[in-house]
Amino acid sequence: MAAQISRVNSVAFLRSGTRNVSTTLPALYAAGQKTKPSLARPNQKNIVLVDAVRTPFLLSGTNYAKLMPHDLARNALLGLVQKTGFPKELVEYIAFGTVIQEVKTSNVAREAALGAGFSEKTPAHTVTMACISSNQAMSTCIGYMQSGVYDVCVAGGVEFMSDVPIRHSRKMRSVMLKANKAKTVGQRLSLLSQLDLKALIPELPAVAEFSTGETMGHSADRLAASFNISRKDQDAFALRSHQFAHDAAEKGLLSDIIPYQVPGQDKPITCDNGIRVSAPEQLQKLKPAFIKPHGTVTAANASFLTDGASACLMMTEDKAKQLGLKPKAYLRDFVYVSQDPKDQLLLGPAYATPRVLEKAGLGMNDIDVWEVHEAFAAQILANLSAMDSDWFCKTYMGRSGKVGAPDMSKFNLWGGSLSIGHPFGATGVRLAIHAANRLIHEDGKYACIAACAAGGQGVGMIIERHPDGKL
Amino acid sequence: MLQKCKTAEEASKLSKACQDLLLEVEHSKKPVVAAIMGSCLGGGLEVAMACHYRIAVTESKTVLGLPEVLLGLLPGGGGTQRFLQLTSLPATLDMILTGKSVKADKAKKLGLVDLTVQPLGPGLDKPDQQTLQHLEKVAVQTAENLASGTIKAKREKSVTDRILAAALKYNFVKDYIFNKAKAQVMKQTNGLYPAPLKILEVLRTTVDKGFEAGYVAENQGFGQLAVTKESRGLIGLFQGQTECKKNRFGKPERSAKTIGVIGAGLMGAGIAQVSVKGFEVLLKDAAAGGLARGQNQVYAGLEKSMKRKKITSFERDRIASNLVGTLNYEPFKHCDMVIEAVFEDLSLKHRIVKEVEAIIPEHCIFATNTSALPITKIAEASKRPEKVIGMHYFSPVDKMQLLEIITNPKTSRDTIASAVDVGLRQGKVVITVGDGPGFYTSRVLSFMMAEAYRLLLEGVEPRKLDKLGKSFGFPVGPVTLTDEVGIDVGAHIGEYLTKCFGERFAGANPEVLNSLVKAGITGRKSGKGFFVYEKGFKGEKPVCTEALDVLKKYSLVPKGLQSDEDIQFRLASRFINEALLCLEEGILANPAEGDIGAVFGLGFPPFTGGPFRFVDEFGADKLVTIMRKFEAAYGKCFTPCQLLLDHSKSNKKFYVRA
């Protein structure tokens, strides 16, 4: 394989099992992006990201409100087929991520695939790992392809917060289930008599940790205090995100969006509707949303509830060549991390980034494009602060010193979850395609994506620009 | 400071000075904000309440309360008055009369705290340090906002509280509430504790005449309570308790992680229950049914803690995962300590020692839970007696605070240190005693019980005997206690101790208890003992006539000495004398552990501070005189021990008064 030939340090790799690019080759880095080596490994298939799409991300309760989750997912799949012109029947496997499940379509991947007209013979499964569910869908497919099970996979994710399952109380459910079996009027009446007013109160889902009962916003606010992140800095970062997203949209860079003609509406939806560049004074006025009155996280510096879906076409490089496709990027190393779900709930990126870089044999400075999930401005700033703190890196990450913070001039330049929106299950693919597109647009070689997730988990992934990649 | 006060007036002055100082804080024009992290109890809470705003951290170590009543005192720095102002009368009575403490969330609901702050996690410094800095930042901000008027302390009382406050203008409402509270106090204390009654008096004065009179009543009441012997006893007890929460044998070489418990009965499962929070626990039983029962007992305990909001459901799951049930010894390969809680039978215990030693690792300690079998005897079956120790738990294990650790002469110091360490981590108050028949607690209790049975045979009504025991200050009377422990258990121990102590143990014929057991009367567990127990039955339990019939067969002729006071002292003096003898013989290491063991394990009247403090307060000479009177009628069993005689002659005390 061509990729293997381009390996610079294959002997060292064979011995250590890891790549070692940057430390031994400072001259190469200085020489420019094109001379940076490929991260391909001998005896390991190269997996490529051909392309990815997403529906416009909308504030929940807006234009998608009457749909169902699989409608969004179906539309993403259709959009992917249209954009790539790839024959549906060649897809061998589909994996989707989602968080809040619609009980009727608990395997939403399968329902969406069937509805989008994919082959009945293409199996599909749904995974859940909170905000990194579609990362998990992607890495599951990578695993299948690298181990030789399949050559062509579609991964994606969907989240639909306009309608969430609200359940009857446990008591009510138990009576209703028993009612199915009750045969006589007497039995039914006796069941009915078990109900009280309390049984009628429904159960609402909450964006709260099961293990601690704490909502994520609350945890983010405490995190902000732990890292001395001021309200002003958070608002400024939020504003930056909105400004960048706004600019990117204006310049037409958000080419991953495919228009959605929602049935019954007079025109297709073509852009995200959560991007709002507000005046700093306006942001300042907002009251804290979670910890009152002294908290710092507000509605404006937190990501909002979003509806949306994404999908990407992935395959082995050999297959892509065989089919004459021009992939955008290689999907390289990835790592999942997890820590205390109470006090380190949102610190996934800080833990995942150095680990995935080490795995890939890269240093912080080698990364040309950073795409990090913005759950809260406070969370992003806390992660940056944690990575830049000797004390934190030594005490909690067991490292000899600080990792260092990413170069902000390469960081989320097309906006992030704060502005574009964050459909939990769909964000991972959005991060990947923005990273790939930005590598091409900004003429870079390596991108690092990172995200945090409920449960105290996180992901880091390395994406490498493909020589054939075009916007 | 308090112990230096010799008179009520001096103590009153102290209280008044404290009140005045805190009034200055309250009247200060500058807003004062109390930032609370850690325990805010007693005087600490009184200071906080005098501030204009209170902010507390919601974590388990931050608790607020006025525990003075537990020391026989009342909050003397305006605590009674301000608590009432901030909360409601029922909440005030509940908290101050019981001395209990609440966490920040509950305190906020009560009105005690204005704002809560969540603790911080890892960041740029240690979490505790960061939380403290954050709390300070929030508090300073709050003080500035209070000063500028941008925030005001919102102290809106609930509708029910407001209705109650209005209703309190009427005397009959006040009477009703105070009478109810007083009845509750009397029921719990038999009127033996002056502090709760004084607290009621003070609060009544406040409700009747206002806060000015209330403050005066408070400092007067404080002064009066400060010089009571009850307060001295309770403070002494508190000091003893603090001592018994430390490990006087130092840190063990290795900290136990895995504990094997043998026998999943009430006792074994109880030991598992107090251990799961801090250890991996292997619970072993011979039968699947018994094991399941034991595992359910542990889980039910955790479920209860969760319902009382002491732990979350997630913590419950985590803790429950520490319990592993087993029907064989295989997993014991990794044990650091084994605690066996099988039936009290020497040959059975010998068998267990051998079985377990065949599998446990070299460093593993073998602890035996027994109430009377000598540890030295049990250790005879062991290959390594230096690792054998006794751990006497009290039933029910999760409620009784005491753990009596018994060493045998060969037990190594590290084994003791490790056993004490485990006990402390189980949340116990630990005393460490030498080996001997009945060790300390079972021995002194049995001597008193022997006298109780003799009194029954002399025709004293079981109910009367119980009543006299309770009015002396025991939480339950001796007859009910026998039923609770089990008449068979009492017979078993009694028979054994008779052999050991002979004439000095005299009381009732040991045959009496055996006859009861033979007749199927074994106490509460069998539904009948000296009283009849029926499920769901409420009110006074009827006396068991069958039991009385058995007693009649062995009846004794009374020798006078049956006045209420005589009866009480016949019981108490044998208890106390034996306790002193245990110190004399070296079973006990010091009087403090003797007092703690007697109060926490056996219910010896807490306000006395324990048998040793009782002798100090009551006077050894007076006790000797009383015992001599009994000795004349009943012989050796009432002969005062040498230590008591020494104290009576020289006027020596067990505790030096500051």
Image (cartoon, coloured by chain):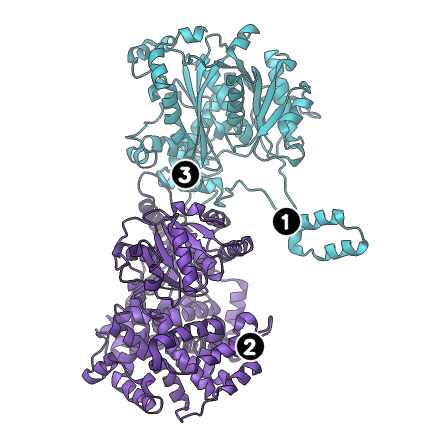
Chain colours: A cyan, B purple
N-terminal of the pair, mark 1 or mark 3, is 1
Asked whether the residues under the numbered discs 2 and 3 touch, taking CB atoms below 8 Å apart as contact, a structural biologist would say: no
Residue type beneath disc 3? Gln
Q: Secondary structure at mark 1?
A: helix
Say which residue label 3 marks.
A344
Q: Secondary structure at mark 3?
A: loop
Residue A155 versus residue B348: which sits nearer the camera?
B348
Identify the disc placed on residue B519: 2
Residue B229 versus residue A387: which sits nearer the camera?
B229
Q: Residue furthest bottom?
A: B560
Do pointers 1 and 3 mark residues of a single chain? yes
Residue A423 visible from this viewpoint:
no
For the C terminus of chain B, give its image quadrant.
Answer: bottom left
Residue type beneath disc 2? Ala
User: How far across and how far down the image is residue A273, in percent?
Assistant: 56, 27
> Residue, x 47% and y 85% (percent of image)?
B456
Residue B378 sits in which quadrant? Answer: bottom left
Mark 1 crowd level (few <14, some 14–19, many ≥20, 10 Å Cα): some
